[in-house]
């Protein structure tokens, strides 16, 4: 009976170690690095057009990235950018009418 307890205890310890090792500690939660308002401002700065106002339409958080939909009505542009925890902006979609 004691041997069965030891085997179960070892099994539980090994599985716990394995499961903890499977978590990726290098992935940083974007919300702890960049606030949503900062991400919006980055997109606004990135799409600055003299005498035109960039408007943020929506912000979505998925796959540890902010996806920000924007438009510049006077310049007839709209699109979606993503921002990761390294503050890299990637253009996902752009539409010019």
Image (cartoon, rainbow, N blue to C red):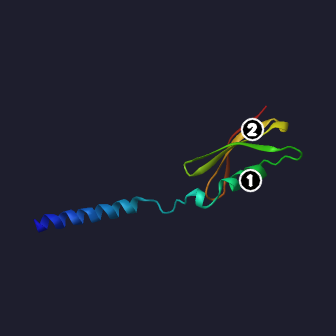
Which quadrant holds the N terminus?
A: bottom left
Residue 37, image x and y in percent?
A: 69, 54
Residue 4, image x and y in percent?
A: 14, 63
Give left or right: position of 54 versus 57. Answer: right
Residue 46, image x and y in percent?
A: 76, 51
> Is 14 drawn above or below residue 64 in the view shown?
below
Give the camera-side residue of 83 and 53: 53
Viewer-side label of 2, 1: 1
Asked if labels 1 and 2 touch by Cβ distance under 8 angstroms, the answer is no
Name the residue: 28% across, 65% down.
Answer: 13
How many numbered markers are drawn?
2
Q: Quadrant of residue 20?
A: bottom left
Give left or right: position of 81 versus 26. Answer: right
The kind of secondary structure element at disc 2 is: strand
User: Pointer 1: residues within 10 angstroms few (<14), some, or many (20+)?
Assistant: few
Whichever of callouts 2 and 1 sits on the residue coming sooner in the sequence is 1
Name the residue: 81% across, 35% down.
Answer: 76
The kind of secondary structure element at disc 1 is: helix
Name the residue: 83% across, 44% down.
Answer: 53
User: Pointer 2: residues within 10 angstroms few (<14), some, or many (20+)?
Assistant: many
Name the residue: 70% across, 56% down.
Answer: 38
Q: Residue furthest top?
A: 97
Q: Residue furthest left?
A: 1
Q: Which residue is mark 2?
A: 78
Q: Residue furthest right?
A: 51
Q: Which residue is mark 1?
A: 41
């Amino acid at each position: 009976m004691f041997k069965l307890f030891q085997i179960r205890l070892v099994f539980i310890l090994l599985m716990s170690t394995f499961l903890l090792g499977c978590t990726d500690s290098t992935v940083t939660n974007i919300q702890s690095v960049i606030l949503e308002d900062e991400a919006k401002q980055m997109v606004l700065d990135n799409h600055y057009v003299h005498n035109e106002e960039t408007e943020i339409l929506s912000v979505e958080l998925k796959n540890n990235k902010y996806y920000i939909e924007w438009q510049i009505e006077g310049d007839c542009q709209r699109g979606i950018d993503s921002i990761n925890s390294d503050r890299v902006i990637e253009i996902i979609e752009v539409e010019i009418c």
